[in-house]
Amino acid sequence: MPLVTTAEMFKKAYDGGYAVGAFNVNNMEIVQGITEACQEQKAPVVLQVSKGARAYANHTYLVKMVEAAVIECPDVPIALHLDHGPDFETCKACIDGGFTSVMIDASSKPFDENVEITKKVVEYAHAHGVVVEAELGTLAGVEDDVKVSAEDSSYTHPEEVEEFVTRTGCDSLAIAIGTSHGAYKFTPDQCTRNEQGILVPPPLRFDVLEEVSKRLPGFPIVLHGSSSVPQDFVQMINAHGGKMPDAIGIPEEELRHAAQLSVCKINIDSDIRLAITATIREYFDAHPDHFDPRQYLKPARQAVKDMVTHKLINVLGCNGKA
Ligand SMILES: O=C(CO)COP(=O)(O)O
Ligand SMILES: O=C[C@H](O)COP(=O)(O)O
Ligand SMILES: [Zn+2]
Ligand SMILES: [Zn+2]
């Protein structure tokens, strides 16, 4: 099937109590690892491209690789989405350039300015059959070239969401309930330790999510910053020359719970990076004489596929929903 928008996948996800995975793509191995997992699991998927991805891999290469995945994975509904669109021009370039969905991220701007820029993107996108994700509330962590400190982050104010959605006409809304970008989502002093001595982060603000959903019944909510930072990858990295002390993510049970509620799209990027880096570090240690990139990119791609398969089945619940 051709590239699709997220409209139908989100409606089914909302009604079915699951979420669609939105995975960031930056190169061929990542596209293949994700989509092979989705083809096997018969799972719909959002492949998303950031400003950084377009700068790294080039818009055309990314679009053509995703179009190749559409051909290779005929059973999978695939949406091609701009992640964290910084301005109207970037959104327009992606809408004109084959994307089926864009995010305009004006969440760091004052409310009325966020409304204005989002509305402008929605008007252009809808006229071209493309859907729009917008954002209210600010996540801590790294977003493209913007670093947001924990102090500057803020949860979404539920009392603002109806006015925002009505005025902008956006199709889905990313909210801030305690997730953040990157592999260091919490400092150890924000966490407690369980009986096994493992750091447990503070819980997500499900009260904010529930308040938002009550005000926007049936409306798809998006969670950014939803990598779980699997500790086996962190240990592999650290055991093979890496240095990622205190890397902490969002517990998978919390994401599974969110997926059963109004959250229809869950964004995962850092876990892909960790899977690849852990696998390649281990490979280099075991095979110091190898120098053919295919030798180490093959297991790295497989690690992405295995990690995504696990998410589809155990976190998102979107397996079998294609
Ligand atoms: O939100 C994301 C992309 O928009 C990715 O978040 P992570 O850094 O938690 O993977
Ligand atoms: O939200 C951020 C994504 O993880 C994309 O990151 P990037 O800007 O480094 O490509
Ligand atoms: Zn944002
Ligand atoms: Zn994000």
Image (cartoon, rainbow, N blue to C red):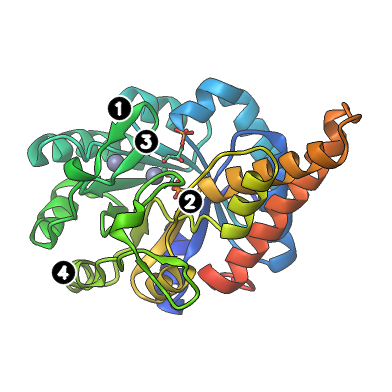
Q: Specify the amino acid type for callout 4.
A: Arg
Which residue does the numbered mark 3 point to in the structure image? 143
User: Quick one: label 3 or label 2, which is nearer the N terminus?
Assistant: 2
User: Quick one: label 1 or label 2, which is nearer the N terminus?
Assistant: 2
Q: Tell me which residue sits at (24%, 67%) in the image.
A: 205
Q: Which numbered dot is residue 88? A: 1
Residue 131 seen in the figure: no
Q: Is residue 42 left or right of residue 116?
A: right
Q: Tell me which residue sits at (64%, 45%) in the image.
A: 237
Q: Residues within 10 Å of mark 3 (few under 14, many from 20)?
A: some
Count of numbered badges drawn on the protein: 4
- Judge depth for marks 3 and 2 and give the one in front: 3
**231 and 211: which one is in front?**
231
The percent position of residue 92, horizontal first and vertical second, equals 38, 27
Label 3: which secondary element:
strand
**CB atoms of marks 4 and 1 within 8 Å:** no
The percent position of residue 121, horizontal first and vertical second, equals 28, 35
Gap between marks 3 and 4, in whole Å? 28 Å
